[in-house]
Image (spheres, coloured by chain):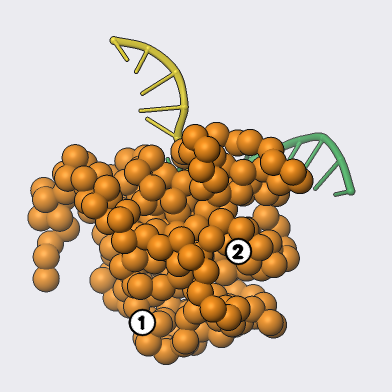
Chain colours: A orange, B yellow, C green
Amino acid sequence: MMHCSQVKERFNATRASRAQKLLRGMVKLEDQPGEPRIVAGLDAAYTRIRGKSIGIGVAVAIDVDSLKPVSCKWYAAEVCVPYIPGLLAFREMRIMAPPLSILAEEASIDMVIVDGHGIAHPRGFGIASHVGVAFRIPSIGVAKKRLHGELRKIGDRIYLMDGDKPIGVYTNGIYISPGHMVTVERAARIVERLRVRGKLPEPTRVADMVTKRLKRRIPGLGLGECSTEARSTGLLDYI
DNA sequence: GCGACAG
DNA sequence: ATCTTGTCGC
């Protein structure tokens, strides 16, 4: 297993953004047939333990009809890469991929909503696109703050534009952009449908909630450990 | 060089 | 993202 210090040494911002320019060519912005039944939410939180920065990644599966969580997985580990605007995925994929991977084994995930931007990114490859391409699954990015693009009102909605190209939508205080295998229009429609409490859609809202509650129990959680049971997070206690 | 800058 | 008390308002 690769140690955190080695990951830290290997990380190079220039190479990372070069990788994004290469990977953006794999992004598909076309809708998939059928409506998603199970949508996963991905989020991460951080805390400090004995001088080390620990990241906690959570993946929650939400049933679109009932809007209820059907499964939840988490993973905690030391974060090795610093936060650099535009390179968020290189920091968070390490803690969000494990739980999503295990969640996908257990539930049939049709789509995933990630906390961050999709194609509304300087190089068109934000964390939501990164997750979508890596897992070959439709994905949407939902961010609370702008990173790239200019707002422009067209008709009755506000779009995030990259020149003449619509790369996202701004609604109710959040920025919605396609990650992979979905159009701007459908991404906005799905997120709006899932937004029933607060400004975030259920998948991301619940994931964020679980992430913060897990922080209080960090000493009791093993680092580098990934939950493998639906009830291992005591998910029902968080609803 | 200066300003912008997801989580 | 995180560090943090009280406080204004529904």
Q: Quadrant of residue A180?
A: bottom left
Specify which label sits upstream in the sequence, 2 or 1. 1
- What residue would you read off at disc 2? A186
Q: Nearer the viewer, residue A47 or A200?
A: A200
Position of residue A18 in the picture relative to residue A142 (left or right): left
Categorize mark 1 by other alpha carbons within 10 Å: few (<14), some (14-19), many (20+): some
Vertical placement of A228 versus A150: above or below?
Answer: below
User: Among all residues in the image, which is located at the extreme front?
Assistant: A164
Q: Distance between the residues labelled 2 and 1?
A: 27 Å
Horizontal and vertical percent for residue A7? Answer: 15, 55
Name the quadrant of the C terminus of chain A.
Answer: bottom right
- What residue would you read off at disc 1? A102
Horizontal and vertical percent for residue B5? Answer: 45, 35
Vertical placement of A1 versus A90: above or below?
Answer: below
Circle 1: residue type = Ile
Q: Nearer the viewer, residue A78 or A186?
A: A186
Labels 2 and 1 in the same subunit? yes
Mark 2 or 1: in front is 2
State how many labels appear.
Answer: 2
Q: In which quarter of the image is residue A46?
A: bottom left
Circle 2: residue type = Arg
- For the question of whether residue A47 can be seen, the reply is no
Name the quadrant of the N terminus of chain A.
Answer: bottom left
Vertical placement of C7 versus A218: above or below?
Answer: above
User: What residue is shown at x 21% (from left), y 45% (from top)?
Assistant: A18
- The subunit letter for the residue under badge 2 reads A
Position of residue A131 in the picture relative to residue A109 (left or right): left
Categorize mark 2 by other alpha carbons within 10 Å: few (<14), some (14-19), many (20+): some
